[in-house]
Image (tube, rainbow, N blue to C red):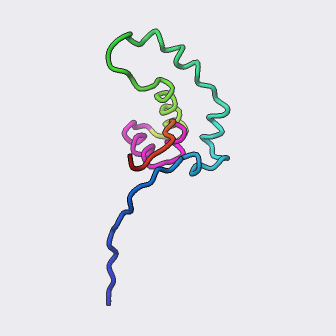
Amino acid sequence: MIGTKTRSFAPLVKVSLEELVPQDHFYRHLERTLDLSLVRELVQKTYAGSGRPSIDPIVFFKLQLIMFFEGMRSERQLMRHAADRLSILWYLGVRRFGAC
């Protein structure tokens, strides 16, 4: 008799990326080593005082670093890649994911 696999997904629970990303991971080392606080200072003059809030300039800069380190040329590829890699989500500051 041939069996079949039924797809059933359990409800997501809130999970901390701190627990899932190894302490010796490259992006953890990069976060400890590279101080990006100056990025906001450097670009502050180029932002308007009113309007819709932008993406955090530090997150944008981190995304550019990820593109470089991962050897990507496409921002679409970067966003697909970032959605699948827990270490990248951790590096970008997404600390929890799961059911709201």
From the viewer's perspective, tell me whether residue 4 is left or right of residue 15: left
Q: Position of residue 25 (x, y in %)?
A: 63, 46
Instruction: Please report the bounds of the magenta region as a residue range.
Output: 73-92
From the viewer's perspective, tell me whether residue 74 is left or right of residue 28: left
Residue positioned most to the bottom: 1
Q: Is residue 79 magenta?
A: yes
Q: Residue at x 46, y 50 (%)?
A: 14
Q: Position of residue 30 (x, y in %)?
A: 63, 36
| Residue 35 quadrant | top right
Q: Residue at x 52, y 18 (%)?
A: 40
- Secondary structure that dominates the magenta span: helix
| Residue 49 quadrant | top left
Q: Residue at x 43, y 40 (%)?
A: 78
Q: Nearer the viewer, residue 8 or 83?
A: 8
Q: Position of residue 4 (x, y in %)?
A: 32, 79
Q: Position of residue 11 (x, y in %)?
A: 38, 58
